[in-house]
Image: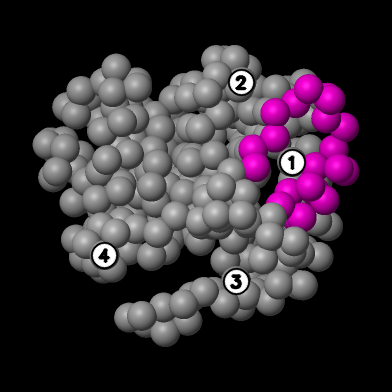
Amino acid sequence: MRRRTGIATRRIAAPDESVTDMAAAAAGKALASAGLRPSDIGLITVATCTAIDRCPSTAAQVAARLGIPSVVAYDLNNGCAGFTTALAGADHAVRAGAARHALVIGGVEGTGHAGIGPVVWGSDPTRADAVRLVDDWHPHFAQEGQSVFRWATGELPAIAREACRRAGLTPADLAGVVTHQANLRIIEAVLRQLDLRDDVVIAQDVVESGNTSAASVPLALSKLTERGDIPSGAPVLLLAFGGGLSWAGQVVACP
Protein backbone atom coordinates (compact mmCIF):
# COMPACT_ATOMS: atom_id res chain seq x y z
CA MET A 1 0.00 0.00 0.00
CA ARG A 2 2.73 2.48 0.94
CA ARG A 3 4.84 1.69 -2.12
CA ARG A 4 1.98 2.05 -4.60
CA THR A 5 0.01 4.95 -3.04
CA GLY A 6 2.29 6.63 -0.52
CA ILE A 7 -0.23 6.08 2.29
CA ALA A 8 1.49 5.21 5.57
CA THR A 9 -1.39 5.70 8.04
CA ARG A 10 -5.11 6.42 7.89
CA ARG A 11 -7.73 7.74 10.30
CA ILE A 12 -10.99 5.96 11.15
CA ALA A 13 -14.09 7.65 12.57
CA ALA A 14 -15.52 6.38 15.83
CA PRO A 15 -18.51 4.03 15.49
CA ASP A 16 -20.92 6.78 16.55
CA GLU A 17 -19.15 9.63 14.71
CA SER A 18 -20.93 10.88 11.58
CA VAL A 19 -20.05 13.16 8.68
CA THR A 20 -22.32 15.75 10.30
CA ASP A 21 -20.37 15.52 13.57
CA MET A 22 -17.07 16.12 11.79
CA ALA A 23 -18.50 18.84 9.53
CA ALA A 24 -19.99 20.76 12.48
CA ALA A 25 -16.72 20.60 14.41
CA ALA A 26 -14.77 21.83 11.38
CA ALA A 27 -17.30 24.58 10.74
CA GLY A 28 -17.01 25.84 14.31
CA LYS A 29 -13.24 25.89 13.96
CA ALA A 30 -13.48 27.78 10.66
CA LEU A 31 -15.79 30.41 12.14
CA ALA A 32 -13.43 30.96 15.06
CA SER A 33 -10.44 31.23 12.72
CA ALA A 34 -12.23 33.79 10.54
CA GLY A 35 -13.49 35.77 13.55
CA LEU A 36 -17.11 35.41 12.42
CA ARG A 37 -20.34 34.75 14.31
CA PRO A 38 -22.88 32.17 13.18
CA SER A 39 -25.27 34.99 12.25
CA ASP A 40 -22.68 36.35 9.78
CA ILE A 41 -23.00 33.31 7.49
CA GLY A 42 -25.38 33.53 4.53
CA LEU A 43 -24.46 30.30 2.73
CA ILE A 44 -23.30 26.85 3.83
CA THR A 45 -22.17 24.20 1.37
CA VAL A 46 -21.00 20.77 2.48
CA ALA A 47 -19.09 18.86 -0.18
CA THR A 48 -19.46 15.14 0.43
CA CYS A 49 -20.38 11.94 -1.37
CA THR A 50 -20.68 9.85 1.81
CA ALA A 51 -23.48 11.53 3.75
CA ILE A 52 -25.82 8.96 5.32
CA ASP A 53 -28.83 11.28 5.42
CA ARG A 54 -30.34 12.16 2.07
CA CYS A 55 -32.64 14.75 3.65
CA PRO A 56 -32.15 16.96 5.60
CA SER A 57 -28.81 17.85 4.09
CA THR A 58 -25.63 17.71 6.11
CA ALA A 59 -25.33 21.47 5.59
CA ALA A 60 -28.75 22.05 7.16
CA GLN A 61 -27.80 19.88 10.12
CA VAL A 62 -24.57 21.85 10.58
CA ALA A 63 -26.54 25.09 10.52
CA ALA A 64 -28.87 23.77 13.21
CA ARG A 65 -26.03 22.63 15.46
CA LEU A 66 -24.20 25.94 15.22
CA GLY A 67 -27.32 28.06 15.49
CA ILE A 68 -26.87 29.70 12.08
CA PRO A 69 -30.20 31.41 11.28
CA SER A 70 -31.96 31.84 7.91
CA VAL A 71 -29.07 30.44 5.91
CA VAL A 72 -29.02 28.87 2.45
CA ALA A 73 -27.73 25.35 3.10
CA TYR A 74 -27.13 22.51 0.69
CA ASP A 75 -24.84 19.55 0.02
CA LEU A 76 -22.75 19.20 -3.13
CA ASN A 77 -21.68 15.82 -4.46
CA ASN A 78 -18.84 16.10 -6.94
CA GLY A 79 -16.72 13.32 -5.52
CA CYS A 80 -13.15 14.18 -4.62
CA ALA A 81 -13.41 17.48 -6.54
CA GLY A 82 -16.29 18.52 -4.29
CA PHE A 83 -14.48 21.03 -2.08
CA THR A 84 -12.82 23.03 -4.87
CA THR A 85 -16.10 22.99 -6.81
CA ALA A 86 -18.05 24.17 -3.76
CA LEU A 87 -15.44 26.82 -3.02
CA ALA A 88 -15.86 28.25 -6.52
CA GLY A 89 -19.64 28.23 -6.19
CA ALA A 90 -19.47 30.03 -2.86
CA ASP A 91 -17.02 32.56 -4.30
CA HIS A 92 -19.43 33.25 -7.17
CA ALA A 93 -22.33 33.71 -4.73
CA VAL A 94 -20.35 36.23 -2.67
CA ARG A 95 -19.21 38.12 -5.76
CA ALA A 96 -22.81 38.26 -7.01
CA GLY A 97 -23.99 39.65 -3.68
CA ALA A 98 -26.09 36.61 -2.78
CA ALA A 99 -24.17 36.20 0.49
CA ARG A 100 -21.62 38.26 2.37
CA HIS A 101 -19.91 35.33 4.07
CA ALA A 102 -20.01 31.69 2.98
CA LEU A 103 -18.96 28.57 4.85
CA VAL A 104 -17.61 25.71 2.71
CA ILE A 105 -17.01 22.33 4.32
CA GLY A 106 -15.29 19.48 2.51
CA GLY A 107 -16.30 16.36 4.39
CA VAL A 108 -14.22 17.14 7.50
CA GLU A 109 -12.86 20.64 7.18
CA GLY A 110 -14.14 24.05 6.28
CA THR A 111 -12.90 27.51 5.44
CA GLY A 112 -14.27 30.92 4.60
CA HIS A 113 -11.70 33.17 2.94
CA ALA A 114 -11.38 36.02 0.49
CA GLY A 115 -8.71 36.06 -2.20
CA ILE A 116 -10.04 33.24 -4.39
CA GLY A 117 -8.91 33.20 -8.00
CA PRO A 118 -11.00 32.23 -11.04
CA VAL A 119 -11.89 28.55 -11.16
CA VAL A 120 -10.99 26.07 -13.88
CA TRP A 121 -13.54 23.29 -13.73
CA GLY A 122 -15.25 20.70 -15.85
CA SER A 123 -15.87 17.01 -16.32
CA ASP A 124 -15.48 14.18 -18.81
CA PRO A 125 -18.79 12.27 -18.72
CA THR A 126 -17.36 9.58 -20.99
CA ARG A 127 -15.24 8.52 -18.01
CA ALA A 128 -18.04 8.74 -15.45
CA ASP A 129 -17.48 5.17 -14.23
CA ALA A 130 -13.75 5.59 -13.66
CA VAL A 131 -14.31 6.61 -10.01
CA ARG A 132 -17.52 5.60 -8.27
CA LEU A 133 -19.34 4.47 -5.16
CA VAL A 134 -21.31 1.28 -5.71
CA ASP A 135 -24.35 0.00 -3.77
CA ASP A 136 -26.94 2.48 -2.59
CA TRP A 137 -27.06 2.12 1.18
CA HIS A 138 -23.74 0.51 2.05
CA PRO A 139 -21.50 1.93 -0.67
CA HIS A 140 -17.92 1.00 -1.24
CA PHE A 141 -15.34 2.75 -3.36
CA ALA A 142 -14.31 1.44 -6.77
CA GLN A 143 -12.16 2.87 -9.51
CA GLU A 144 -10.24 2.04 -12.66
CA GLY A 145 -6.84 2.81 -11.19
CA GLN A 146 -4.66 2.76 -14.28
CA SER A 147 -7.16 4.78 -16.31
CA VAL A 148 -7.41 7.42 -13.57
CA PHE A 149 -3.62 7.58 -13.24
CA ARG A 150 -3.18 8.14 -16.99
CA TRP A 151 -5.92 10.77 -17.10
CA ALA A 152 -4.66 12.66 -14.05
CA THR A 153 -1.02 12.76 -15.10
CA GLY A 154 -1.95 13.66 -18.67
CA GLU A 155 -4.63 16.32 -18.06
CA LEU A 156 -4.07 17.94 -14.66
CA PRO A 157 -0.82 19.81 -15.50
CA ALA A 158 -2.61 21.85 -18.19
CA ILE A 159 -5.51 22.53 -15.81
CA ALA A 160 -3.05 23.70 -13.15
CA ARG A 161 -1.30 26.03 -15.56
CA GLU A 162 -4.63 27.48 -16.72
CA ALA A 163 -5.72 28.13 -13.12
CA CYS A 164 -2.48 30.02 -12.56
CA ARG A 165 -2.92 31.98 -15.80
CA ARG A 166 -6.44 33.04 -14.85
CA ALA A 167 -5.08 34.28 -11.53
CA GLY A 168 -2.44 36.32 -13.34
CA LEU A 169 0.40 34.05 -12.20
CA THR A 170 2.69 31.31 -13.41
CA PRO A 171 3.41 28.06 -11.54
CA ALA A 172 6.78 29.55 -10.58
CA ASP A 173 4.94 32.25 -8.59
CA LEU A 174 3.23 29.74 -6.29
CA ALA A 175 4.22 29.40 -2.66
CA GLY A 176 2.31 26.14 -2.25
CA VAL A 177 0.34 23.46 -4.07
CA VAL A 178 -2.45 21.45 -2.51
CA THR A 179 -3.85 18.75 -4.77
CA HIS A 180 -6.44 16.10 -4.02
CA GLN A 181 -4.61 13.61 -1.82
CA ALA A 182 -5.48 10.49 -3.80
CA ASN A 183 -2.11 8.97 -4.45
CA LEU A 184 1.42 10.24 -3.86
CA ARG A 185 2.59 8.87 -7.21
CA ILE A 186 -0.07 10.92 -9.02
CA ILE A 187 0.82 14.07 -7.07
CA GLU A 188 4.52 13.73 -7.83
CA ALA A 189 3.96 12.88 -11.51
CA VAL A 190 1.69 15.89 -12.04
CA LEU A 191 3.90 18.40 -10.25
CA ARG A 192 7.04 17.27 -12.07
CA GLN A 193 5.47 18.70 -15.21
CA LEU A 194 5.07 22.20 -13.74
CA ASP A 195 7.88 24.74 -13.48
CA LEU A 196 7.65 25.12 -9.72
CA ARG A 197 10.26 26.80 -7.51
CA ASP A 198 12.52 24.56 -5.48
CA ASP A 199 11.12 26.01 -2.25
CA VAL A 200 7.44 25.56 -3.11
CA VAL A 201 5.49 23.74 -0.37
CA ILE A 202 3.77 20.59 -1.63
CA ALA A 203 0.98 19.08 0.47
CA GLN A 204 1.54 15.37 1.13
CA ASP A 205 -1.11 14.72 3.74
CA VAL A 206 -2.00 11.50 1.88
CA VAL A 207 0.92 9.91 3.74
CA GLU A 208 -0.69 10.61 7.12
CA SER A 209 -4.42 10.69 6.39
CA GLY A 210 -4.90 8.62 3.25
CA ASN A 211 -7.47 9.57 0.63
CA THR A 212 -10.24 11.52 2.38
CA SER A 213 -12.15 12.39 -0.81
CA ALA A 214 -13.67 15.89 -0.77
CA ALA A 215 -12.00 16.56 2.57
CA SER A 216 -8.47 16.02 1.33
CA VAL A 217 -7.72 19.48 -0.08
CA PRO A 218 -9.04 21.55 2.89
CA LEU A 219 -7.63 19.07 5.40
CA ALA A 220 -4.16 19.29 3.85
CA LEU A 221 -4.36 23.09 3.48
CA SER A 222 -5.44 23.57 7.09
CA LYS A 223 -2.48 21.54 8.34
CA LEU A 224 -0.04 23.59 6.27
CA THR A 225 -1.46 26.88 7.52
CA GLU A 226 -1.65 25.78 11.15
CA ARG A 227 2.03 24.81 11.03
CA GLY A 228 2.93 28.08 9.36
CA ASP A 229 4.50 26.30 6.37
CA ILE A 230 3.09 28.91 3.96
CA PRO A 231 2.93 32.65 4.74
CA SER A 232 -0.53 34.16 5.06
CA GLY A 233 -1.57 35.78 1.80
CA ALA A 234 0.86 33.79 -0.34
CA PRO A 235 -0.56 32.19 -3.51
CA VAL A 236 -1.53 28.52 -3.23
CA LEU A 237 -2.90 26.34 -6.02
CA LEU A 238 -5.80 24.09 -5.05
CA LEU A 239 -6.42 21.28 -7.53
CA ALA A 240 -8.80 18.35 -7.22
CA PHE A 241 -10.30 15.64 -9.39
CA GLY A 242 -12.73 12.83 -8.79
CA GLY A 243 -15.83 10.96 -9.86
CA GLY A 244 -17.54 12.18 -12.91
CA LEU A 245 -14.70 12.35 -14.08
CA SER A 246 -14.65 15.90 -12.73
CA TRP A 247 -12.06 18.48 -11.80
CA ALA A 248 -11.84 21.96 -10.28
CA GLY A 249 -8.93 24.15 -9.31
CA GLN A 250 -8.12 27.73 -8.38
CA VAL A 251 -5.35 29.84 -6.86
CA VAL A 252 -6.17 31.20 -3.40
CA ALA A 253 -4.40 33.51 -0.98
CA CYS A 254 -3.21 31.36 1.91
CA PRO A 255 -5.36 31.96 5.03
- Viewer-nearest of labels 3 and 4? 4
Residue to which mark 1 is pinned: 160
**Going by the image, does 184 lie left or right of 153?**
left
Residue to which mark 4 is pinned: 15
- Viewer-nearest of labels 3 and 1? 3
Locate residue 166, reporting x and y percent. Answer: 70, 31
**Going by the image, does 21 lie left or right of 152?**
left
Residue to which mark 3 is pinned: 131
Q: Earlier in the sequence, mark 1 or mark 4?
A: 4
- What's drawn in magenta, residue-wise? 184-204
- Viewer-nearest of labels 4 and 2? 4
The image's colouring method is one colour
Assess disc 1: are there few (<14), some (14-19) or many (≥20) residues with their C-alpha within 10 Å of its C-alpha.
many
Locate residue 155, reporting x and y percent. Answer: 79, 55
Type of amino acid under label 4: Pro
Q: Secondary structure at mark 1?
A: helix
- Is residue 168 positioned above or below 162 on the image? above
* Occupied quadrant, residue 221: top right
In the rendered image, the quadrant that contains the N terminus is: bottom right
Assess disc 4: are there few (<14), some (14-19) or many (≥20) residues with their C-alpha within 10 Å of its C-alpha.
few
